[in-house]
Image (spheres, rainbow, N blue to C red):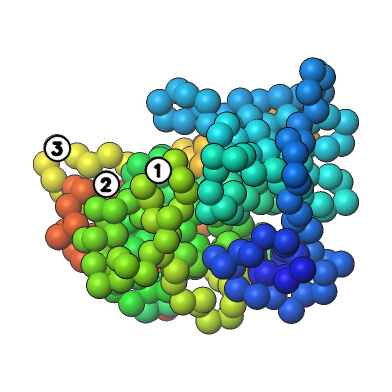
Amino acid sequence: MPTYHCYASQGIASEIPLPELPPADLPPDSSLHVALSDNAIIPAATDPDWQHDFVDPHGDLAFRCLRFDRDFYFDFPGIGQVRITPDDRILIWQHDAASIESIRHVLLDQVLPRLLAQRGHLVLHGSAVRTPGDRVLVILGDSGMGKSTLASAFACSGADVLSDDGVLLDFAPPGIRAVPGYPGLRLWPDSLGALFAERATQSTPMSHYNDKRRLAQPVPAGNGAAAAIDAILLLQPARDDRAIVIESLAPQAGCMALTRNSFQLDLGDHDNVECLFAQAAKAACETPMLTLSYPRDYALLPDVIERITSTVAALRPR
């Protein structure tokens, strides 16, 4: 099976081609192993030891997570099912109505970050960019707030996209670093057309159940190595006065924002949740956190980027 590179040292040996990820030189025995199943894999007519339903912003069921003994399961309605065993094996069943793009999407953007979170890593549901001035920014916000659009605008200004949907924080000294997942962007057609009109035909479907498109980005220097974070931005709704507003976020509020925007799997694992809060508190205390609100107007994005970069440069002079 070919092996792919994801989240720095994490390798994935997969029966499913994963074109979103760069190839890896890691030996297969140090990797997660992904295989396809011919049949549904969640045990039928059996009560799980634990279950949690994740809902979308409209309150509808997006997917559910279950645990039977030591194995975790994901059930994505109309897409497929996933089983994760303690020996790093991931088994995937693809629903007849689902596309392979949808399977790759739930594996890379839902399953893998939650698996790493269950192993004690703080994985943020957000984007990360490295600006031409070598500033590394992490962008957080609720679904639909424009994380990918802002990351794309940075890309248009010459920044490297480190990750669009998952950023693992590395707490090893000397400072907190962002470990990207993969550099591709996921955009709605209007953002894709406004920001990458000349490359829109190079995009591919993200899934069969919505219109988002994937747009590959160059692998940044270092092949996804961790990079010291200069600031974390929390996107908030635009104000009525159409102003671009950047404000400091207190550590207590920052800790809650990081927690709210992190991936988790077993919410009943108290030791794991305690570890999450401790990591979020450390990151909020040691990394500048800023709130950002601005009108959702593509024409204003260059001004937004200029304001962000000048603010961060003042916070972190070199």
Relative depth, front residue between 206 and 278: 206
**Mark 2 sits on what residue?**
293
Q: Is residue 110 above or below residue 42?
A: below
Q: Is residue 78 left or right of residue 309?
A: right
The amino acid beneath tag 1 is Asn
Q: Is residue 211 above or below residue 27?
A: above
The x and y percentages for residue 229 are 51, 65
The x and y percentages for residue 225 are 61, 73
2 or 1: mark nearer the eye: 1
The amino acid beneath tag 2 is Ser
**Mark 1 sits on what residue?**
210
1 or 3: mark nearer the eye: 1
Q: Quadrant of residue 191?
A: bottom left
**Residue at screen point 58% across, 80% down:** 222
Indicate which disc residue 123 carries.
none
Q: Quadrant of residue 308?
A: bottom left
Q: Quadrant of the C terminus?
A: bottom left
For marks 1 and 3, give the CA distance.
30 Å
For marks 3 and 2 on the same chain, the one whose residue lies earlier in the sequence: 3
Q: Is residue 192 left or right of residue 4?
A: left
**Residue at screen point 60% across, 73% down:** 22
Q: Is residue 38 left or right of residue 190?
A: right
